[in-house]
Amino acid sequence: MPDSIACPNCKTEIPLTEAISRQVEERLRAGFEAEKAELLAERSTLLAKKDAEVEAQVAKARDELTAAAEVKAAEKVATKMRDLSARLEEQDSLRREAQERELELLKEKRELEVDREALELQVQRQIDEERATIVAWTPSRSTC
């Protein structure tokens, strides 16, 4: 068994131990390269999954924040609506009270006008009676 073999291309003598080492090295290198490629592919897959999980979490958090903001806004609007409704009821009540007072004042004014007219009529009658009494008691002037 020779200790070396000749390269079929360049005819260089290669020691047998070096040839075996190189083959083993090439096999190992090819195995490592394949394993490296497999690990890189697995890493890419895991990163893609992790990115998808992060995106899903971000979307979920965004949806939760949006929902919370909508609830808060709805509560704020509901509170504002209750306040406006209470104000409206208060103003409506005040308006009704003012209308009732106005009606009472108009009624009192009419009654006062009726009373004033009745008083004027009574005073006029008394004046007419007094005049009639004065005319009746005044001696008539005779012409002499």
Image (tube, grey):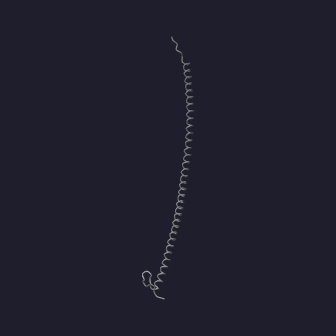
Residue 136 place in picture, x, y as percent:
56, 18
Q: Nearer the viewer, residue 142 or 118?
A: 118
Against 54, is 7 above or below? below
Q: Is residue 53 above or below residue 35?
A: above
123 vs 9, left or right, is right
**Furthest residue toward bottom:** 1
- Percent position (x, y) of residue 47? 51, 68
Residue 2 rendering spot, x and y as whole percentages: 47, 88
Residue 44: x, y in percent? 50, 69
User: Eyeballing the image, is 138 above or below 85?
Assistant: above
Count of marks placed on residues: 0
Quarter holding residue 110: top right
Q: Residue furthest top?
A: 144
Question: Quick check: 4 left or right of 140?
Answer: left
